[in-house]
Image: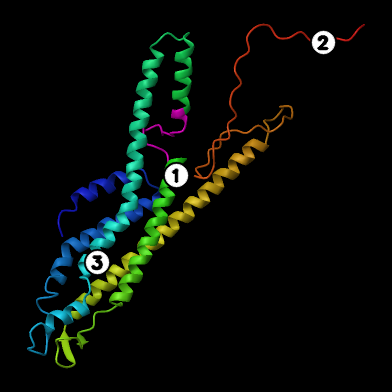
Amino acid sequence: MGDWGFLEKLLDQVQEHSTVVGKIWLTVLFIFRILILGLAGESVWGDEQSDFECNTAQPGCTNVCYDQAFPISHIRYWVLQFLFVSTPTLVYLGHVIYLSRREERLRQKEGELRALPAKDPRVERALAAVERQMAKISVAEDGRLRIRGALMGTYVASVLCKSVLEAGFLYGQWRLYGWTMEPVFVCQRAPCPYLVDCFVSRPTEKTIFIIFMLVVGLISLVLNLLELAHLLCRCLSRGMKAQRGQDAPPPGAPPRSPMPTRSSSTCPWERDPRPRRAPPTTGSPPASRTGPT
């Protein structure tokens, strides 16, 4: 199976920047898939080809029948499934690392600019540009990035890709092998001289393992769908709260025209509606016009 330590360390970093449902999905991936397959997979499927026997002595017949019965080994198929399903999460992790390092560089640049003379207009413009860029990166009090804006879009895209890949691999496994392991495989393929019966070792144990992996795959798919629903509900809830906050003026305040404000919603399709600040005016205000008395 190889060493899964590197993948586990990467996915453990993703867990710090995931929702509650995403953390449950990572737990299912670690314990019920990677760990179980690494500990019990090779012992169950290690004799898959060596103990595959057919009732013929024709040279090459057993090999071609095994190739027909198992186009790809179950354990290798599941390894490919884990790698493909984990890839969108690793892409999301790359985005998190990129934003974290960018936020650190912006903070360093902000400190350097604040150390310069404050009355220099070029310094003020550069500092304002840095602050605008930092406003696009939402950071919590503990230093972790909040899942908002572009990061939210990457997170939603990763969950969608995981759902599609999970469903595709489940369908592919059903098309290749079905849900059970039959003890006898009937083969008729050259160079076999006639209809040959081939026998699979420990079919009941392998059937239990197949059903277990299918159930875990279905649980993973359901968790991905639940996470999409959770993200959608959170977006709608934050959007409604922001809308109510804009519509309701403070008590005792005169009615005013609604002004667009920065919404706290995490929906990736929302843009920053903040208006640009007008440049400060210099000099005395213009005198009011009065008519002839």
User: Where is mark 1, residue-wise?
Assistant: 152
In the picture, which quadrant includes the N terminus? bottom left
- Specify the segment rendered in magenta: 133-147
Quadrant in which residue 74 is drawn? bottom left
Quadrant in which residue 215 is drawn? bottom left
- Circle nearer the N terminus (1, 3): 3
User: Where is mark 2, residue-wise?
Assistant: 289
Expressed as whole percent of the image width and height from the top left, the position of residue 178 reads 30, 77
User: Where is mark 3, residue-wise?
Assistant: 77
Q: Amino acid at mark 2?
A: Arg
Q: Amino acid at mark 3?
A: Tyr
Is residue 227 depicted above or below 184 in this figure? above
1 vs 2, front mark? 2
In the image, what residue occupies the spot 52% across and 45% down? 269
- Mark 3 to mark 2 CA distance (whole Å): 82 Å
Expressed as whole percent of the image width and height from the top left, the position of residue 193 reads 14, 92
* Local crowd size for mark 2, using a 10 Å CA cut-off: few (<14), some (14–19), many (≥20): few
In the image, what residue occupies the spot 31% across and 69% down? 214
**SS majority, magenta:** loop
